[in-house]
Image: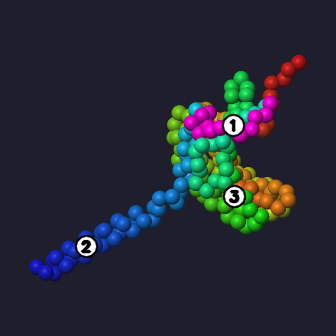
Amino acid sequence: MKKSVKTLALITISFLFTTFSNAQLKLPGLNSVANDIKKVIEDYPNRFINLMGEVQMQNTQSTDYHCNFTVNGAEEAFITRYPAKKEICSWQAVMLTTDNFDKARQKFKLLFNQLNNLSVKAGTGTFKLKADYESPEESKKFTSILFSFEPANESVKKLKVEISMQYIEPMEWKVKVLIYDRDREDDERGAIKE
């Protein structure tokens, strides 16, 4: 009888150990940037109104607002609105400013890994962000990855999610996440007025 109790106890302990060890692999906060970006994308249909704070700067063609939602690890985040027939808006967060190219490249890769294949609710459905990785090169001074929504859908056609890494004079690399409206594709012509 003692052997069966020991065996049962050993099986129970083994089961609990494997259950809790799997749970520990999913650390909360490991993907918190991705979860925060997901929340920003989900507010896109509201034109980021739920994230909008006080006016930072007002220009004739745009107004910048402080973002009242803190994205994990962001140095700053803001929303820009452009007046038009249909209001165009964008959200961006500076995730890292450094003079070290390798640190910037690591942050860029980390953001890509967290956002690629991220499942998000946007428009009229649930989609995955998809992109191919492009490694930044110090000589290029600018690298950008534009994510697409899969499956493609008319409700998210103009919504863009992008990460960028850019060299800013005199000695800074900036890594950003951007979420914005794209009124038309780069190769699409605008209206011609005569």
Q: Secondary structure at mark 1?
A: strand
Q: Secondary structure at mark 3?
A: strand
**Residue identifier under label 1:** 55
- In the image, is 70 to the left or to the right of 82? left
| Above or below 158: residue 39 | below
Q: Quadrant of residue 57?
A: top right
Q: Amino acid at mark 3?
A: Leu
N-terminal label among 2 and 1: 2
Q: Which numbered mark, 1 or 3, is in the foreground of this view?
A: 1
Residue at (58% x, 49% y) in the render: 70
**Magenta stretch containing residue 48, yes or no?**
yes
Q: Amino acid at mark 2?
A: Ile
The picture places residue 28, in percent across and down from the top left corner, at 47, 59
**Magenta stretch containing residue 51, yes or no?**
yes
N-terminal label among 1 and 3: 1
**Residue identifier under label 2:** 11
Q: What is the C-alpha distance between the residues marked 2 and 1? A: 61 Å
- In the image, is 45 to the left or to the right of 170? left
Q: Amino acid at mark 1?
A: Val
Dot label at residue 84: none
The picture places residue 140, in percent across and down from the top left corner, at 82, 58
Residue 184 appears in the rendering? no
In this picture, which residue range is highlighted in magenta? 47-60
Residue 94 appears in the rendering? yes
The crowd level at tag 1 (other Cα within 10 Å; few <14, some 14-19, many 20+) is: some
Quadrant the N terminus occupies: bottom left
- Image marks 2 and 1: residues in contact by CB distance under 8 Å: no
